Amino acid sequence: MTEDNPLINDIKLKAEGALEADADFYCALEDDLNQKWVDDKIRRQKGMTCEEDVDIKEEEIDLENSGKPYGNSDFKTDAVLSCPSCLTTVCYESQRHELYKNQYRAMFAESVTVDFDKKLYIPINFKGKIEETHNSVPENARNEDIFYPVNCVSCKHQIGVYDYDEVFHFYEVVTGYS
């Protein structure tokens, strides 16, 4: 009796069409493709060759490793860092500070500017603790105690400092954990 009912048949056809339409918006490999894009971006930033030159189709990705998310990734990070004012991503690969859990250091950053015209004097005592930040630098200051402000390119918000060893220290950022 239900097979002859045109109303039920019409509902079944519309439901099947809706399921097919929903399938167009889902990509089972999207996370893997996004991770590959980030890895290629970091490789390019480090001056390494990237695999982005070749167009990769979904069929070409190794489905054996898709059960293990990001297993082929060369890069390990404690957090992806963004500016707190405009949420622009400033660092994909960072290391969390051992004592100060809201601070990170990184060798590479993007969408930031370093203000080399402004020096900050931040003396660090022998225990590794910061004593006090000064805008004026004394003449006998060690190079290790001189830092330069790091600002977001988009909104000019100061998000960290750059040190003598060419390391970024981010302390005012939004973290995204991977």
Image (tube, rainbow, N blue to C red):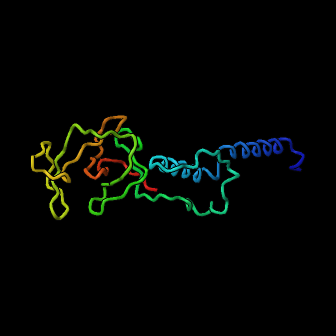
Q: Position of residue 56 (x, y in %)?
A: 65, 48
Q: Position of residue 29 (x, y in %)?
A: 63, 52
Image-based side of 102 in relation to 48, left or right: left
Image-based side of 6 in relation to 176, left or right: right
Q: Position of residue 57 (x, y in %)?
A: 68, 48
**Image height of 15 relative to 70, above or below:** above
Residue at far left of view = 139
Q: Going 42% across and 53% down the picture, which residue do you hit?
A: 93
Image-based side of 84 in relation to 39, left or right: left
Residue at far top of view = 155
Q: Going 46% across and 56% down the picture, which residue do you hit?
A: 178
**Image height of 79 relative to 54, above or below:** below
Image-based side of 10 in relation to 39, left or right: right
Q: 132 or 45: which is nearer to us?
A: 45
Q: Quadrant of residue 15?
A: top right
Q: Quadrant of residue 116?
A: top left
Q: Position of residue 153 (x, y in %)?
A: 36, 36
What count of labels does the image hold? 0
Q: Going 28% across and 47% down the picture, which residue do you hit?
A: 162
**Image height of 171 relative to 86, above or below:** below
